[in-house]
Image: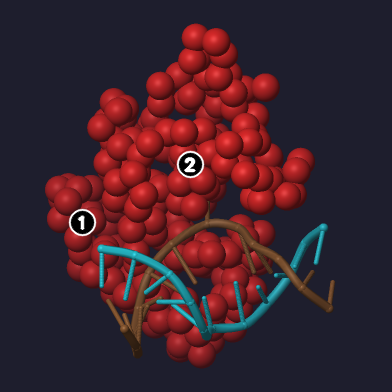
Chain colours: A red, B brown, C cyan
Amino acid sequence: MLMEIYNQLFNRYGDLNWWPAESPYEVIIGATLTQNTNWSNVELALANFKKNITPYRVKEIDLEELKEIIRPAGFYNQKAVYLKAITKWYERYDFDVNKVKAQPLDRIRKELLAVRGVGNETADSILLYAFDFPTFVIDKYTQRFCQRYGIEAGKDYMSHKNYFEANLLSDRALFNNYHALIVINAKNHCKAKPTCRDCPLEDTCGQLGFDDNGKPFLS
DNA sequence: CGCCAGGGCCATA
DNA sequence: TATGGCCATGGC
């Protein structure tokens, strides 16, 4: 079922080429800044770096100065601390993407979760979109998506993640685009119908439907 | 003007 | 383990 739904979403939106960033480190920064924050605000913050988003700079920069740069992204007092912390973690691997990629997924995931400001979603976003690890990213949209369409994937983050990983081929390209498709589909939907969030769960609210044979389709 | 966005931390029970 | 308050800007 999950694969059929993916195909429907793919037919509509195609390959979205996530994450929108110019480097793995920029993915790390973006994933942290976008916590409970509109992406357009994150873009303003990223623009304030003036094309100079490197771990070396974030490591050396004064904390108060960093706060000013990321201010548009909101929660800047804590996020500035978070950026320092995740950058310090990255330094263990000499800011080298390949040294991180050479490690086992589970090890890096645990390390990331131990970093201040990195929870499940941020960790998985970084693992998948910065370092190409085959891990599935769950967010509020995904959980709402499952609830709305009767996909019984559990109730918390890990149960959803386990459900998707258990019912899909472990393919980083698939995981990458699937999460992106769910987000884009949700945003499109919300844009067209701002009150969708308030729809009762039994409402088929959304573009996804199921035919008489139980096959999913996008209307 | 009020609502809320691609979460996570912490205190409390 | 499970809620709830808190963090903060900018777009609509």
Looking at the picture, how far across and down is residue A55, in whole percent? 38, 69
Q: Which residue is mark 2?
A: A147
Q: In screen coordinates, is A36 left or right of A92?
A: right
Looking at the picture, how far across and down is residue B12, in whole percent? 34, 88
**Is residue A120 shown above or below A175?**
below
Could you give the CA–CA distance between mark 1 and mark 2, rounded to whole angstroms? 30 Å
Quarter of the image for the N terminus of chain A: give it: top left
For mark 1, give the secondary structure: helix
Give neighbour class at mark 2: few <14, some 14-19, many 20+ (Cα, 10 Å).
Answer: some
**Is residue A32 among the parts visible in the rendering?**
yes
Q: Which mark is residue A178?
A: none
Which of the pair A7/A64 is nearer the observer? A7
Say what amino acid the circle numbered 1 marks. Answer: Ile
Q: Which residue is mark 1?
A: A108
Quarter of the image for the C terminus of chain A: give it: top right
The picture quadrant where one finds residue A86 is bottom left
